[in-house]
């Protein structure tokens, strides 16, 4: 069901906690920062669905919204977990992990008619199991399981619908949040937001982590050297993105990597240039070229980078598909 993450034995689970702490320290973040970011993302994506929004990788369900998961990976990025029916196997689902779809497509979404085919909501158990495998392999250090449920804290309005977000962090205990809502004419009005102590599903085998052992953050020159090897390139790009404008010396090499045939690599480089910001002006000609690339993801990421690096150049692609 979810096979591209390498499994690790139980005695190798503990380093996930230290890696999480190291990442937080390097970015001056707390566990609360991580969980707040996930809660905000989960509520925004659920609101998008409840107001009639559609994303091509998520099932369309008749009532409410499709259950989904979200996590924060070692690079500090939000990734979404969702189910699609398994071809030729009725009632079976495959679980996929992809980058934050809402952030990627929000500026380019278009109105669509209601889908011709509705699906039953996918099982949350399948998503939780897949996220557990991802966490065991070190792929995420914070997780959110998102579906609909009545708010148990409101006895007088027990039937009121609510968005349920079950938050977990590898370094702290789980918490479940409920946001009551009302949808009128495809517009969501937020109600009460409450939380209760949760039950761990994604990090159940790991348990709360305690020890922090941050290692020194590599300097820019070391990260540039790591760009030379395919084995360390993606990790180096994530680290450079976290450094923002400090990574300016790496821009010439990043421009070279934009010519690579690997879609994942090019998208990652584009996100890194976007994080560096206006200082990466040298990359503008290549970004303009890639903003019309035939690859949809590369095209969108190039336009997103242009908005930050050269807003004037980005305006020509404002209404382009």
Image: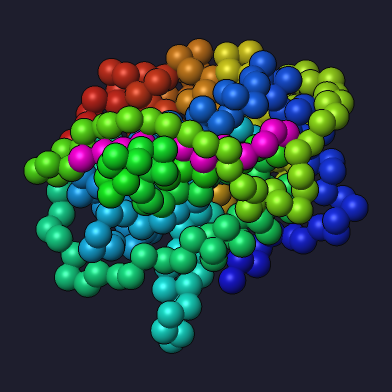
Q: In this view, does 6 lie to the left or right of 92?
A: right
In this rendered view, identify the residue nearer to me: 22 or 92: 92
Image coordinates for residue 22, horizontal then vertical, percent: 77, 27
**Residue 172 within the magenta-colored segment of the rendering:** yes
Image quarter of the N terminus = bottom right
Q: In this view, does 265 lie to the left or right of 314?
A: right
Which residue is drawn at the image coordinates 65% and 67% (left, top)? Answer: 3
Which residue is drawn at the image coordinates 84% and 20% (left, top)? Answer: 216
Image quarter of the C terminus = top left
Image coordinates for residue 236, horizontal then vertical, percent: 70, 33
Q: Is residue 291 visible?
A: no
Name, please, the residue furthest toward the front: 156
In this rendered view, identify the residue nearer to me: 286 or 21: 21
Identify the coloring.
Answer: rainbow
Q: Can residue 36 be seen in this view?
A: yes
Say if 22 sits above or below 63 in the image: above
Image coordinates for residue 207, horizontal then vertical, percent: 76, 44
Image coordinates for residue 103, horizontal then vertical, percent: 39, 37
Bounds of the magenta segment: 171-182
Say if 199 sits above or below 302 in the image: below
Q: Is residue 20 left or right of residue 213?
A: left
Q: Is residue 147 left or right of residue 176?
A: left
- Magenta stretch, main secondary structure class: strand
Which residue is drawn at the image coordinates 28% and 42% (left, top)? Answer: 157
**Residue 204 within the magenta-colored segment of the rendering:** no
Which residue is drawn at the image coordinates 45% and 14% (left, top)? Answer: 278
Say if 57 sits above or below 272 in the image: below
């Amino acid at each position: 069901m979810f096979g591209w993450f390498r499994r690790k034995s139980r005695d190798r689970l503990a380093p996930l906690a230290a890696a999480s702490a190291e990442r937080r320290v390097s970015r001056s973040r707390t566990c609360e920062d991580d969980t707040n970011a996930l809660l905000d993302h989960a509520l925004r994506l659920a609101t998008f669905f409840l107001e009639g929004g559609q994303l091509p990788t998520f099932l369309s369900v008749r009532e409410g919204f499709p259950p989904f998961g979200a996590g924060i990976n070692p690079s500090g990025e939000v990734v979404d977990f969702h189910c699609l029916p398994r071809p030729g196997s009725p009632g079976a689902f495959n679980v996929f992990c992809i980058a934050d779809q809402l952030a990627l497509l929000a500026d380019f979404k278009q109105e669509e008619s209601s889908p011709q085919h509705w699906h039953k909501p996918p099982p949350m158990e399948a998503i939780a199991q897949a996220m557990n495998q991802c966490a065991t392999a070190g792929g995420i250090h914070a997780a959110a399981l998102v579906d609909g449920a009545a708010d148990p804290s409101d006895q007088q309005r027990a039937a009121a619908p609510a968005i349920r977000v079950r938050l977990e962090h590898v370094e702290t205990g789980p918490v479940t949040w409920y946001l009551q809502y009302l949808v009128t004419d495809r517009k969501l009005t937020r109600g009460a937001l409450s939380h209760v102590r949760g039950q761990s599903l994604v990090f159940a085998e790991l348990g709360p982590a305690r020890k922090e052992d941050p290692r020194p953050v590599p300097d820019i020159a070391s990260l540039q050297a790591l760009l030379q090897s395919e084995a360390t390139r993606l990790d180096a790009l994530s680290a450079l993105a976290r450094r923002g404008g400090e990574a300016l010396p790496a821009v010439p090499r990043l421009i070279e990597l934009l010519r690579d045939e690997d879609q994942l690599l090019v998208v990652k480089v584009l996100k890194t240039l976007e994080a560096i910001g206006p200082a990466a002006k040298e990359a503008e000609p290549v970004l303009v070229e890639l903003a019309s690339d035939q690859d949809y993801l590369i095209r969108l990421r190039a336009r997103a980078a242009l908005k930050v690096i050269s807003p004037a150049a980005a305006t020509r692609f404002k209404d382009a598909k």
